[in-house]
Image (spheres, rainbow, N blue to C red):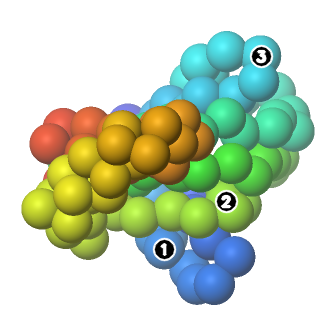
């Protein structure tokens, strides 16, 4: 049996996911980071990007839009400004949002929609 760490993925408005994982990969202001059981304690600022949580049942992927993560005592807290699991994302709506953002030249909105589409197409949760 692989060692596991406890993960809590929380957005400003709700608990998104909680459970055990073998590794979590996230994008921080210092670059991408992988956190496994026994990692040194850390505090990191999240960049918008996918967060991949590898569990015994398979990967859980979320689109995370800013926030921070904290790891200590084999517990990882991912506190996001906004987060959506891959299977919660309405791809048709995200595609429309991306098109609208391109039309009005809103780079930030286009980036958010693009991330949502990337995560929806690449991941699923258990």
Q: Where is residue 18 in the image (x, y as percent from the top left)?
A: 49, 70
User: Judging from the image, what secondary structure is the residue with disc 1 in?
Assistant: strand
User: Where, quadrant-wise, is the N terminus in this rendering?
Assistant: top left
Q: Where is residue 76 in the image (x, y as percent from the top left)?
A: 68, 51
The residue lying at 12 percent from left, 62 percent from top is: 92
Query: Which residue carries the number 1 mark?
Result: 16
Q: How far apart are marks 1 and 2 (CA)?
A: 10 Å
Q: Is residue 33 left or right of residue 55?
A: right
The residue lying at 21 percent from left, 66 percent from top is: 93
Residue 8 seen from this side: no
Q: Based on the displayed image, in which of its 4 quarters is residue 88 positioned?
A: bottom left
- Nearer-N-terminus badge (3/1): 1
Q: How crowded is mark 3: few (under 14 residues within 10 Å), some or many (20 or more)?
A: few
Front residue of 49 and 53:
49
Query: Which residue carries the number 2 mark?
Result: 80
The residue lying at 71 percent from left, 39 percent from top is: 46
Q: Where is residue 74 in the image (x, y as percent from the top left)?
A: 70, 47
Query: Which residue carries the number 3 mark?
Result: 30
Q: How far apart are marks 3 and 1 (CA)?
A: 24 Å
User: Judging from the image, what secondary structure is the residue with disc 2 in?
Assistant: strand
């Amino acid at each position: 049996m692989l060692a596991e760490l406890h993960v809590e993925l929380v957005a400003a408005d709700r608990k998104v996911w909680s459970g055990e994982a073998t590794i979590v990969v996230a994008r921080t202001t210092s670059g991408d980071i992988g956190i496994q059981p026994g990692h040194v304690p850390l505090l990191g600022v999240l960049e918008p990007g996918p967060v991949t949580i590898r569990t015994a049942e398979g990967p859980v992927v979320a689109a995370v839009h800013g926030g921070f993560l904290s790891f200590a005592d084999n517990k990882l807290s991912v506190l996001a400004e906004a987060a959506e699991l891959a299977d919660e994302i309405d791809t048709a709506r995200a595609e429309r949002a991306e098109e609208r953002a391109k039309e009005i030249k809103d780079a930030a909105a286009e980036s958010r929609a693009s991330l949502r589409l990337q995560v929806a197409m690449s991941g699923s949760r258990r």
